[in-house]
Amino acid sequence: MDLYEHMGKDLFRAHAIATPHGIVATSPEEAATATAELGGRSVVKVQVQVGGRGKGGGVVLVDSPERAAEEAARMLGSDFKEHEVTQVLVEELLPIAREFYTSVLLDRSTGGYLAMMTAEGGVDIETLAVERPEALRRVGIDPALGLRPWHVRELTATLPPDAREGAGEVLRKVWDLLGARDLTLVEVNPLVQLEDGAVVALDAKVTVDDNALFRHPDLEVLSAQFPIDPVEARAREADLQYVKLDGEVGIIGNGAGLVMSTLDVVAQAGGRAANFLDVGGGASAEKMATSLQVVLSDPAVRCVFINIFGGITRCDVVAAGILGALDRVEARVPLVVRLDGTNAAEGRRILGEAAHPRIVPVATMDDAAAEAARLAGAAA
Amino acid sequence: MSVLVGAQTRLLVQGITGSEGTFHTLRNRAYGTQVVAGVTPGKAGQDVEGIPVFDTVADAVRETGADTSMIFVPPRFAADAIVEAADAGVGLAVCITEGIPVRDMATVHAYLRGTDTVLVGPNCPGVITPGVANVGIIPGEVCTPGRVGFVSRSGTLVYQIVHELSTAGIGQSTCIGMGGDPVHGIGFIGALELFEADPETDLVIMTGEIGGDDEERAAAYIAEHVAKPVVAYIAGFEAPPGKKMGHAGAIVTGSAGTAAAKAEALEAVGVEVARTPSGVARIVALRLAG
């Protein structure tokens, strides 16, 4: 789960990492009031779960409460890189002397963590990493040993001498925060040194490990602040992975890999997927019913392709789930169903005996994709 | 005739008394796997259809000589279960559990480097040597004994592609579902190393998916260390582009993580990349014939 900047900064402050004073606003009036409280000048920043805000006009300096209200009015309710903006962060302006960059993140290639720092903050860090990799210091961190003093010395070595102690302190606290709150990414760009020498986190990009949210109920509730499509919200409640796409063939499958593969095969058969929906492992009848309701709620769907290969998921349970769902939801489009794997014969028998007029059983994935694409095209 | 699991495997199951644990344990035994023990804390002395249950893995190993563990323990206890298996001297731990916090896995991963235990998973379907032993949840009936090694990140794609292979009359030496979690045990490189050394494997299939850079690193390994033919499949060409916040991930991998980037990296080292699961079987048939 990617946090908004202000949520990340709340975590920073709780771990004594210095950040600018800021106020969250959800209306132009609140942005104006906040700017007045901050002395009449501020920086107004869109709060979205995506990066590249600076270049994209999502961060604006204002010199009056009226200007803050104008900018907030422009930002709120609009989309920033396809993310709906419902909050802005209004922050005090600080006297910045220098800008650095630091991040600590999970490194899936080593199974450990990686910390990075450069004295050249505020620039395009991906470009810097390619063009002048020597300017970006990196150290791998063994999760059992943690951040060692030499790591800190190595990372801060290219910073001005009077910034090293402050930056090192931020690194140590970020490492502690990462472990304490099960974070997979903390990125601070820029990390700044003020004219008085203090080192402050001007930005916060923080990602929480979804698998660990059970240990952090206070973070789990933050997700309620993220705007979400009502259909996606319903899917999430049922523990389904649903992503809306813009085609006509509704897709339901089990396992992210098989569902992705199904999208590819449908595309090669000339169809366009209306969504990605992974019912996950051990799909119950209830989950299958909700899946169908979710996919059919998209008016663009002209055909649904249910592609199940049973491992933990048992095909007889899936078949019963499909029939159970059809008792509750009207199937306004054909359902192409392909079942294989654990208890597949039993699943096919259940569907065969039901002989539902909307269910089109197909034996192979390729043939089912072709049939689904054809039916979606024919209904157009 | 196999890697990782075989006729000699003596399997214990951690979490044997849970419903999924029991269901798949009995399926594995019915397939021919020697299932010698189960572990559920507090249930020592009970049995599951004749399989004795112990309180700890150490007890189970002492009493039964188990050398492989299959883990069906809930996510918040699963990392501990892996460490318990390693501490008891189990040589192979196959963790099926989905949803383990990645920080727990990072710690386990670091710990296992100092042990002789090989981990498969977590969040994986397990390992099967067709006709001989099944350790996990791969439906045995779709597999056929043969000489093609198979390793996959995605679970259900293991089933789909093995099904395509078997339908085309192509048997498998061993199929490894490595799991899709960011921090996992054996990966493409470890599996390729095993298959390259296995005299009963003639060709290796690897199937990847978008995200991370496991496929790109496997490509570099293949160029240097693998003489046997390798055929690949990558899922996710049509997947919507991921929305990520930070730049740090891309800096680390130096790769976009897209299906196209992965296919390109593999093709650059002579690996043929199929565009559909059925295409994998067609390419493999041609390679084996030619």
Image (cartoon, coloured by chain):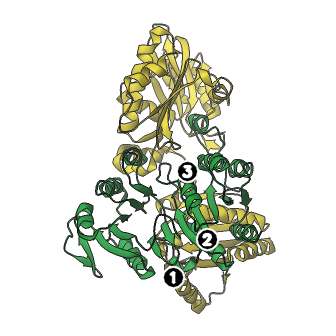
Residue A204 appears in the picture as rendered: no
- In this rendering, the label closer to the viewer, 2 or 1: 2
Mark 2 → mark 1, Cα distance in angstroms:
27 Å
**Does label 3 lie on the same chain as label 2?**
no
Q: Identify residue type, mark 3.
A: Ile
Q: Residue at x 68, y 52 (%)?
A: B259
Q: Looking at the picture, does residue B29 appear above or below residue A274?
A: below
Question: Secondary structure under badge 1?
Answer: loop
Side (left or right) of B227 relative to A271: left
**Does label 3 lie on the same chain as label 1?**
yes
Residue reaching furthest front?
A: B199
- The colour of chain A is yellow
Q: Residue A225 in the image: x percent, y percent? A: 48, 44
What label sits on residue A343 in the rendered view? 1
Q: Residue B57 in the image: x percent, y percent? A: 27, 62
Quadrant location of the C terminus of chain B?
bottom right
Q: Viewer-proximal residue, A34 or A180?
A: A180
Q: Looking at the picture, does residue A329 appear above or below residue A171?
A: below
Q: Residue B76 in the image: x percent, y percent? A: 34, 55
Task: Tell me the residue that label 2 is attached to.
Answer: B147
- The colour of chain B is green
Local crowd at mark 3 within 10 Å, few (<14), some, or many (≥20)?
few
Residue reaching furthest bottom?
A: A353
Total marks shown come to 3
Q: Identify the mark nearer the N-term, 1 or 3.
A: 3
Q: Identify residue type, mark 1.
A: Asn
Q: Residue at x 47, y 64 (%)?
A: B4
User: Residue B10, located in which quarter of the rendered image?
Assistant: bottom left
Q: Viewer-proximal residue, B122 or A312?
A: B122
Local crowd at mark 1 within 10 Å, few (<14), some, or many (≥20)?
some
Q: Residue B18 in the image: x percent, y percent? A: 33, 71
